[in-house]
Image: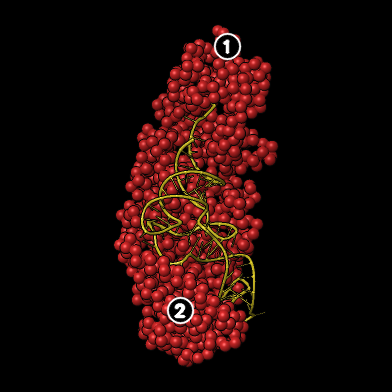
RNA sequence: GGGCGAGUAGCUCAGCUGGUUAGAGCGCCUGCCUUACACGCAGGAUGUCGGGGGUUCGAGUCCCUCCUCGCCCACCA
């Protein structure tokens, strides 16, 4: 056999970059719309749009996991002859990116206002164009098979056009409106936030009980409870429940608001007041509380503002002089303390009670958000939610794991309007213009030069759109929408799978579905796969700020990309989080590293032994020439293929609707990985490779057969593994000397293995494995040194098929001898020794007089017999129970009966063995 | 406050519609540098499947309950 030049160690660093470049140069990942069935081609399209990472992001394990999952799916479908498109891109990430630049400015002692809007946007643009490609480069480094010719960016001119089109369309359809209401305000980012961007967290705070004296009888007062006493300066009423006997007589009277010294009424409101909570009387602060805003609107109350955008006390709109001079400009939290002190001095503080309640924080900077009255643009969501709900209910979209479907439905059923305007500078400017003269509002696709009504000067709205307003168009804006006639739209929309983390189910996934229906009239994808989160050993989510992160590029440098990918995919149960130890990369990534090394060594052995002479494709080998081991490994391969297919599942629903039986099928990546691993390691390497050693050494015709089966089996195994470990499989696959014109040039687009029904499980080889295992166990039990060969004999007299067993063991003697260092031949010796019972009924007698401890063997046999007896008793009881035989499925009963027969025979033999060993 | 999920070997988890003697990886113990692989090979130990009750011929799997974690949602000031 010809030696190969494969180094003894796989060195990922030396091959990964050049392989990746080869793939790109060959255009392996570039999708061709003309080949899509939808556009007249003959390939089914398979499309995944990448959740665009923030343009300023650097790769972390979360990206690593998310993108590896997508890559595995895309590579799998590409091999299944789909026209596969994985569309990459980045998100301009409004607040997040603006914050990055603001931090830079802060370091220079400046704010964005020092620069001015244009200079700030320019600076951000420059920053993004310098550093923005980093994450995409890093994705290349971990082997992502994206179509980089289609790389998109949410703030590109093309996608900006889509954003503007979407805004204008929704406005034309009456689904966008300007609202004057209480929204969540981040006083650090100086912008409004959507409900989703204002995250809840439970906090320990106080419930302050304040006494407001009655105007006409200051000796009497009404006590209200509040968690935010500083807002009391903006109170316009005190509300009580109309049925509350404690306060009924006070309704209609007025109280004098302390500090502010304004007279406000006591009103009755049955919706907004819970008589059970606090004192049953509630202060009404319409400008600084959403609930109070509702009540204020119901009762036509004024809405004074006492907080500045920066979160300091100020006399805003309608506030007159409610905030006393000494408080103006004071931060809200300090003002809270001061006001409490002032109220205390005035005798208006009844008591303070500790109270845990939910406080909302900005999802970007964690500042406590303030409910604040302001003018914002909103999208009316109810009409958009309907088709998005229907699609899931009708199984045109599935969400995996299943439990998230309920969460999705619940959110959409209770959806509230979406605040889409942000008081930021980085983003898509709202396409609304105001006329200075006639106050006409213009919403337009193209910037108007003048007011279309009066020709007056127009000013564009200062605000930008929520980042997610561009994200929700991603599945089609990236394909060329609003130009509906593009080949890409025709060929690739709708897409197939959307792979992301559950955290952005509402932010992004649900809105994309709504957007798909709103603008394309069709669902954007049929499967949402929500994978778990990467956590450390304490189950804390990995993050750079917590310092418990793992840099995927570190892992790549240490163990290679394949090891990284294998580890995360193998550990990814459906919906389960992935636990990795940032303090012990060795331990965390050993599964991947070990597997890659094993695969490499399998390849080295196999390629060396197969040699470089061309091997005939398996289909050219006459089945009659195949040996027992050949048939066994080919049967095992079929099983492995079937398992991988079942684990990966149907790629898409038939006719656009998921059949109930397929609704939860597939996307079980850890099972897929395990099936492939088990095949190459525990079957191909542990057994088949060993079985060929003698045959290859012997040469001749049979060696040719072995070479062909080795090459074929390894070829298929590499293909099964390519989606997970694309680099090493490529290196090994291209060296297989298979003479087959259909094989293709790159494994990445070689055909996915198909089952060959002519190969079935091979029980004869299993019998041999059984014998080898038993002998190995015996050797270990008696600590027989490896160099010490033993000789055993076969007694097939009790076998179900004696002739077959004798033939099998005669033929496989050399193999057994090699693996178990024990020959099995000759007739039964009279010598005392250990007797191994095989499932066929035959036994192997190992005559090791003087070594075998008869008493020990006797005890072992007795224990075995007892165990078998117990099991057999239970089995017999089950089978004589009519409840079981009548009700259990036929195949179960049948299997139990077969087992009964087998066990009974075995029991009899075992009893014999015990008698001969123990002499009773 | 509402909803959901998890608790299976020392650790991380499989175990899909109830049906052979509950599995894998890592770790651990014993023996091996057997010319593909010590990142390996061979053998081994460890589980009253969170507690309790129930349904069933049969429960890790279904129901109830309790305990312990975790997640999502929420305008009780």
Exactly how many numbered labels are in the figure?
2
Q: Nearer the viewer, residue A865 or A211?
A: A865
Mark 1 vs mark 2: which is more N-terminal? 1
Which residue, given by chain and number where applicable, does mark 2 sit on?
A: A911
Question: In x, y percent, where is residue A322?
Answer: 59, 17
Residue that carries the numbered disc 1 in the rendered image: A220
**Letter of the chain that mark 2 sits on in the rendering:** A
- Viewer-nearest of labels 1 and 2? 2
For residue B65, above or below residue A801: above
In the image, residue A638 above or below residue A551: below
The residue that appears at 50% across and 11% down in the rendered structure is: A253
Image check: B40 left or right of A292?
A: right
- Residue B45 position, x and y percent, is 57, 68
Please tell me the colour of chain B: yellow
- The residue sitting at 40% across, 52% down in the picture is A527
Asked which quadrant contains residue A368, the reply is top right
Say which chain is red.
Answer: A
**A278 vs A149: above or below:** above
Does residue A411 show up? yes
**Which residue: 50% across, 16% down?**
A246
Q: Residues within 10 Å of mark 2 (few under 14, many from 20)?
A: some
Q: Nearer the viewer, residue A184 or A164?
A: A184
CA neighbours of label 1 inside 10 A, class few (<14), some (14 to 19), many (20+)? few
Task: Name the residue at 65% across, 15% down.
Answer: A346
Is the Cβ of the residue at disc 1 closer than 8 Å to that at disc 2? no
Secondary structure beneath disc 2?
A: helix
């Amino acid at each position: 056999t010809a030696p190969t030049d494969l180094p003894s160690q796989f060195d990922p660093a030396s091959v990964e970059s050049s392989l990746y470049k080869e793939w790109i140069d060959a255009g392996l990942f570039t999708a061709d719309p003309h080949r899509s069935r939808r556009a007249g081609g003959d390939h089914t399209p398979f499309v995944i749009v990448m959740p665009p990472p923030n343009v300023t992001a650097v790769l972390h394990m979360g990206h690593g996991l998310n993108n590896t999952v997508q890559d595995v799916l895309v590579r799998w479908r590409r091999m299944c002859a789909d026209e596969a498109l994985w569309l990459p891109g980045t998100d301009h990430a409004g607040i997040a990116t603006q914050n990055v630049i603001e931090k830079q400015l802060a370091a220079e002692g400046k704010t964005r206002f020092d620069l001015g809007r244009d200079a700030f946007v320019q600076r951000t643009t420059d920053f993004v164009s310098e550093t923005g490609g980093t994450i995409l480069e890093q994705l290349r480094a971990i082997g992502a098979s994206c179509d980089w010719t289609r790389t998109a960016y949410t703030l590109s001119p093309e996608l900006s056009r889509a954003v503007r089109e979407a805004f204008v369309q929704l406005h034309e359809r009456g689904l966008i409106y300007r609202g004057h209401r209480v929204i969540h305000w981040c006083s650090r980012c100086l912008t409004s936030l959507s409900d989703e961007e204002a995250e809840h967290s439970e906090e320990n705070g106080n419930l302050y009980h304040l006494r407001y004296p009655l105007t006409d009888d200051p000796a009497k007062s009404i006590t209200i409870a509040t968690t935010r006493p500083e807002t009391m300066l903006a109170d316009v009423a005190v509300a009580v429940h109309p049925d509350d006997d404690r306060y009924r007589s006070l309704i209609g009277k007025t109280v004098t608001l302390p500090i502010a010294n304004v007279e406000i009424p006591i009103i009755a409101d049955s919706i907004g007041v819970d008589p059970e909570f606090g004192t049953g009387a509630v202060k009404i602060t319409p400008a600084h509380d959403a609930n109070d805003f509702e009540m204020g609107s119901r009762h036509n109350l004024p809405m004074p503002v006492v907080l500045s955008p920066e979160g300091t006390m100020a006399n805003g709109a309608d506030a007159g002089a409610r905030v006393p001079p000494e408080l103006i400009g004071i931060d809200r939290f300090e003002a809270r303390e001061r006001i409490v002190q002032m109220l205390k001095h005035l005798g208006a503080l009844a008591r303070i009670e500790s109270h845990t309640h939910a406080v909302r924080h900005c999802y970007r900077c964690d500042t406590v958000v303030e409910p604040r009255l302001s003018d914002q643009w909103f999208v009316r969501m109810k009409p958009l939610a309907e088709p998005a709900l229907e699609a899931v209910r009708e199984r045109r979209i599935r969400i995996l794991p299943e439990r998230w479907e309920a969460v999705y439905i619940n959110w959409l059923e209770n959806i509230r309007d979406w605040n889409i305007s942000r008081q930021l500078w980085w983003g898509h400017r709202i396409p609304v213009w105001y006329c200075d003269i006639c106050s006409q509002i213009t919403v337009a696709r193209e910037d108007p030069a003048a007011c279309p009504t009066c020709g007056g000067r127009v000013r564009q709205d200062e605000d930008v759109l929520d980042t997610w307003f561009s994200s929700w168009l991603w599945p089609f804006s990236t394909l060329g929408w609003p130009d509906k006639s593009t080949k890409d739209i025709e060929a690739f929309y709708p897409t197939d799978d959307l792979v992301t983390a559950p955290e952005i189910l509402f932010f992004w996934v649900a809105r994309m579905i709504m957007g798909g229906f709103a603008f394309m009239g069709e669902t954007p994808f049929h499967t949402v796969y929500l994978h778990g989160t990467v956590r450390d050993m304490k189950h804390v989510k990995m993050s750079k700020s917590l310092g418990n992160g793992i840099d995927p590029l570190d892992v790549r440098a240490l163990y290679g990309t394949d090891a990284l990918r294998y580890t995360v995919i193998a550990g990814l149960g459906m919906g389960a989080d992935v636990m990795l130890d940032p303090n012990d990369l060795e331990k965390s990534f050993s599964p991947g590293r070990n597997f890659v090394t094993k695969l490499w060594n399998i390849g080295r052995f196999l390629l060396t032994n197969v040699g470089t002479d061309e091997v005939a494709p398996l289909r050219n080998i006459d089945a009659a020439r195949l040996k027992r081991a050949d048939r066994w490994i080919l049967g095992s391969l079929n099983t492995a293929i079937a398992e991988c297919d079942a684990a990966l599942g149907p790629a898409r629903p038939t006719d656009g609707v998921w059949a109930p039986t397929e609704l939860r099928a597939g996307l079980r990546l850890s099972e897929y990985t395990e099936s492939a691993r088990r095949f190459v390691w525990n079957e191909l390497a542990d057994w088949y490779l060993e079985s060929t050693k003698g045959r290859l050494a012997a040469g001749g015709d049979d060696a040719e057969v072995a070479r062909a089966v080795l090459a074929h089996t390894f070829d298929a195994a590499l293909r099964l593994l390519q989606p997970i470990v694309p680099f090493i499989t490529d290196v090994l696959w291209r060296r297989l000397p298979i003479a087959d014109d259909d094989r293709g040039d790159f494994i990445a687009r070689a055909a996915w293995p198909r089952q060959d029904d002519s190969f079935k499980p091979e029980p004869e080889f299993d019998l041999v494995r059984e014998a080898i295992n038993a002998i190995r166990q015996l050797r270990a039990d008696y600590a027989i040194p490896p160099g010490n060969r033993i000789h055993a004999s076969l007694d097939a007299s009790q076998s179900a098929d004696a002739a077959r067993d004798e033939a099998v063991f005669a033929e496989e003697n050399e193999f057994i001898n090699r693996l178990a260092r024990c020959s099995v031949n000759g007739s039964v010796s009279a010598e005392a020794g250990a007797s191994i019972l095989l499932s066929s009924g035959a036994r192997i007698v190992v005559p090791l007089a003087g070594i075998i401890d008869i008493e020990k063997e006797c005890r072992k046999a007795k224990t075995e017999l007892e165990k078998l007896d117990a099991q057999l008793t239970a089995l017999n009881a089950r089978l004589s129970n009519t409840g079981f035989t009548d009700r259990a499925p036929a195949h179960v009963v049948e299997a139990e009966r077969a087992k009964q027969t087998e066990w009974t025979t075995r029991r009899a033999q075992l009893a014999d063995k015990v008698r001969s060993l123990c002499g009773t």
